Amino acid sequence: MKWDVRKVDVLVVGAGAAGLMCAIAAGQRGRRVLVVDHANKVGKKILMSGGGRCNFTNTGAGPSNYLSANPHFAKSALARYTPADFIALVERHRIAYHEKELGQLFCDESSKQIVRMLLDECAAAGVTIEVDCPVQRVRKMAHGFSATTAHGEVHAESLVVACGGLSIPSMGASGFGYELARQFGHEVLPTRAGLVPLTLSGKHQDHYQDLAGVALPAVETRVGKQAFRAGLLFTHRGISGPSILQISSYWQPGDDLRIDLAPDQDLGTWLVGQRAARPAAELKTVLADVLPKRLAQRLCEQWFESRPMRQYREAELAGIGAQLANWPITASGTEGYRTAEVTLGGVDTDGLSSSTMQSKRVPGLYFIGEVVDVTGWLGGYNFQWAWASGQAAGAVV
């Protein structure tokens, strides 16, 4: 649809989770809301998330599950719109869901149900949505903003920037939100890929390169004082799996990365017991009882001699157990925004109100969702930030 000039109360740039949530809250207050998106359909990241079932929140979401230069910033929005509030919305729309693990909630059927729910809520609130409608230019006017879009000019009292970060450019991610922030005098903190597989290179890759596809259901991955217990997967380029995606948001090149390959048992004590029980068995055979066989063989080829268990002293076995509980892997980098689930960094929260997401510099300008320097853990936390920050802005915009 083309128009010359359209006048609205609120223009939301970005039809993702945060933008739609904001539009719903504003529309329910009687505001005339227009949502525009350069993509050809709304909620693309919602549709792909959780393997197509959308991990739409986490029952345990709280400020400690988020990274930000200001760890207190997210507290207000998260406290005022909780996982229980979004769950109530999901239940009102009779969407069946289940808890997978660690508070992660998924649709029983399809992530399309969450997008449908948001679109139905938008329709009920009188919200207008235009897709295939990139914004080319935004100007501040005496009373609001003027945006030049592919469909025409929009004049709005309030402008909400909800166009996400740089992760997954194949789905249309761009730095437009950061450009708008800078245009209006906001600081944008350095961005980098988060929740992303790590890559190995050189001899570190040679050690593991033919283990692609080998998975461990539970390891504990550590960088400094931060640790996550979840699965690990070896890939052609390095390491992935939930524990690696989680720690990737804390890891930076040069950081010491350690992995407890069997966090649920004391391998040193267990190996000493195995020496008594199976003296003729080789170490690689014994280790294959607690680790994937190919990994056990590789560890013995590269780092430990594989001899019959009776040939090891207790102290040697205890030492091997200690090494496996504190295994170093030297990552060279990440797979980058191409596969990253989120973008770390973004619009500096110092320039925003934590209760409304409004700019402290430009009245009527708001930033919500991933474009802001608030990044959640893997497991529904980033959606909860989208809902909460969207609701915070929508309640006042």
Image (cartoon, rainbow, N blue to C red):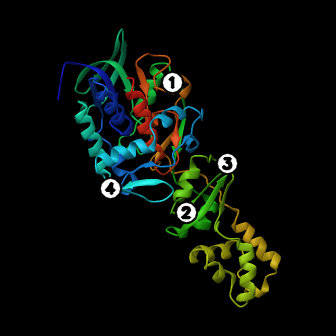
Disc 4 to disc 3, C-alpha distance: 44 Å
Q: Which mark is residue 352?
A: 1
Most extreme residue toward the top is 142
Decide: marks 4, 3 in contact (CB < 8 A)? no
27 lies left or right of 371: left
- Viewer-nearest of discs 1 and 2: 1
Q: Nearer the viewer, mark 4 or mark 1?
A: 4
Q: Is residue 165 visible?
A: no
Q: Identify whether 226 is placed above or below 395.
A: below
Q: Name the quarter where the C terminus is drawn.
A: top left
Q: Nearer the viewer, residue 306 or 368?
A: 368
Label 4, label 2: how many angstroms apart (C-alpha)? 29 Å
Q: Residues within 10 Å of mark 2 (few under 14, many from 20)?
A: many
C-alpha span from label 1 to label 2:
37 Å
Residue extending furthest toward the bottom: 280
Disc number lying in front (4 or 2): 4
